Image: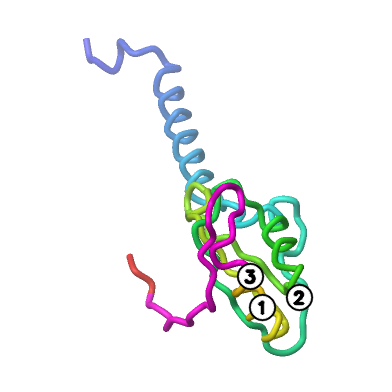
Amino acid sequence: MHILQSIPDYVPLALALCGFLAWFIVGIVAGQRVPKSDDEKQGKPQQKQSSGRTFDIYVGNLAYNMRERELAQTFEKYGEVTSVRIIRHKLSGKSKGFAFVSMSDRDASIAAIKAMDGSEVHERKLVVHEAKSRPRRANRH
């Protein structure tokens, strides 16, 4: 008796279906995109549109539960905030503990840096300074 004759007719079909489902699930998981901000998760635009130059501020030592809106409100005391971007892990979407805040006015950004550097937010002392531009890097694989 041949070994394939002893296998019921539905087994190859079940194996093929399992293989297809595994392929399908892996494709979905691999293609899944993690929202980068709280506003993006809710479908809201992340940035206010502003004309002209913006001044970028680096904010470090953030609490991991800090939200973009909360950080924007903290800096709006000193002037118009055009965007806030909390840097998140590419796969998990969790905060890496630092962010960039853009303001429309240079004097307001300097005032915010002076006032916020060393201030305590969520029981953590913030590190705040002017963001340094860095050259673009080629994709690393």
Callouts 2 and 1 close, C-beta under 8 Å: yes
**Residue at left offset 66%, top offset 73%:** 112
Residue identified by numbered label 2: 79
Q: Residues within 10 Å of mark 3 (few under 14, many from 20)?
A: few
Residue 2 lies, in percent from the top left, at: 22, 15
User: Could you tell me which secondary element the residue under label 1 belongs to?
Assistant: helix
Residue 141 sits in quarter:
bottom left
Q: Is 105 left or right of 29, judged from the image as shown? A: right
The disc labelled 1 sits on which kind of residue? Answer: Ala
The answer for how far apart the CA atoms under marks 2 and 1 are is 9 Å
Q: Nearer the viewer, mark 2 or mark 3?
A: 3
Callouts 2 and 3 close, C-beta under 8 Å: no
**Residue at left offset 39%, top offset 78%:** 137
The disc labelled 3 sits on which kind of residue? Answer: Ala
Q: Residues within 10 Å of mark 1 (few under 14, many from 20)?
A: some
Q: Is residue 112 above or below residue 64?
A: below
Q: Is residue 136 above or below residue 16?
A: below
Magenta residue span: 115-138
Callouts 3 and 1 close, C-beta under 8 Å: yes
**Residue at left offset 58%, top offset 74%:** 57
**Does the magenta run of residues contain 134?**
yes
**Does the magenta run of residues contain 29?**
no
- Which mark, by number, is residue 115? 3
Instruction: Work out whether residue 49 or residue 58 is closer to the camera in this orientation and state it.
Output: 58
